[in-house]
Image (tube, grey):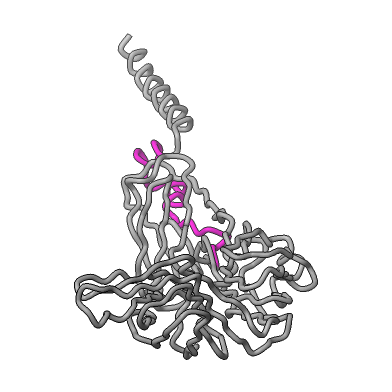
Amino acid sequence: MTSRRGEAVPILILAIAILLVIYTYFLPLSEKCKLIPSLPDCKAEEKTLVFETVPGILEKQETAARYWIPDVQLFRRETVDVSSALENAEASKSWLFSKPAEAEIEAQRYGREAKLFIFINDAEGKLNVYLDNELIGVVEGEGVQQLVLDPKRLRETNMLKVVPTAPIWPFMSNKYTIGKVILKENYILTNNRISAPFAIKENSKDIRDIRLSFETRCFTDENVGVFIGNDKVFDEKVCQGVSTDVTDKLLKNNLTGNITFSSDGNYDIHDIMFDIRMKERTWPTYYFNIGESDKPLLLKMQFNETGMKKLTAYVNGEAISVETSKKEWQTAINKYIKEGTNSLLLIPEETVIVGKLEVE
């Protein structure tokens, strides 16, 4: 009897061993490594994961760009009535009070000569004429009076003021009735077409749209035409700001060429610009598998050059700021990692070159 019991013990031990082997075989690798860390598969699991496809050049995300074009002046009329003011205005002055007549007048910055024509209906005494609070002349009597101005002192908008001189006697007043005041300017004539070169450096594949905008001051009734290469953008009278889409025309001309303004009238065209909006860039996402581990997991990057590098690494959507002037950088990422498949996304703040990317 004792002999049979002695034979049963080894058999029981063998059965338990076989069951343990079978149980261990079907355990997940992470559980096997906890029980038997020396397994070859466990050592393989601890090896550095190097991504076969390295990021390379990561260019900064540009959202917009602007290209300025020099101002354009088109003058095909030698003499132009630039502005008119003080229509049917009255001005008076006594010893006790002063009632000037004043108004804004526009001028052109590129006039060769400028004259002020004052149409006076009724006159008593003399009339002082001020431009931006500076006395520019004194006229007297009814009819059309002229004052020659220095065109260099004129601004785009000027304050014109007229006021009579004081009377001789204290209880009298001097009065003037103004029909109107006209500012005339003479110009050096220009060509009726003026072109300016442009070259947009952005990649056409990254461009969402391009708008041409500019401001104008028109002094005649003629249209102004705008061309990109040989393609007409528009041809109409424009006396205010313009903004129009020119994406197709610029892409057709490979983002380089000339912009041309043409007119048989007088135009001052300024603040000319191309405004470019960029497409939102999609960045590559890297995927890697991680088993359960208590050891530190490091995200490592090697850069091809020194100098400050700024980018953000997103591990499973969690942001990690990367800011370094060294050629190598690393940080622990255990708290962002989950067992199984993980994702990694790199978005640069400045253009950088990542030569090697690995998780260890």
How many badges with numbers are in the image? 0
Figure quadrant of residue 222: bottom right
**Residue 337: horizontal and vertical position, in percent?**
39, 45
**Residue found at the far right of this picture:** 230
Q: Is residue 181 left or right of residue 169?
A: right
In the rendering, at what x and y percent does residue 342 appear? 46, 45
Residue 39 magenta: yes
Q: Would residue 260 be seen by someone viewing this image from the given angle?
A: no
Question: Left or right of 47: which side holds 235?
Answer: right
Quarter of the picture holding the N terminus: top left
Q: Residue at x 61, y 69 (%)?
A: 202
In this view, 208 is above or below 153: above
Q: Residue furthest top?
A: 1
The relative height of residue 168 versus residue 280 in the rendered view (above or below) is: below
The C terminus lies in which quarter of the figure?
bottom left
For the point 47% across and 57% down, the residue is: 346
The magenta segment is 30-56
User: Horizontally, is 281 left or right of 322 in the view?
Assistant: right
- Which of the pair 185/208 is nearer the observer? 185
Image point (54%, 69%), residue name = 66
Q: Quadrant of residue 170?
A: bottom left
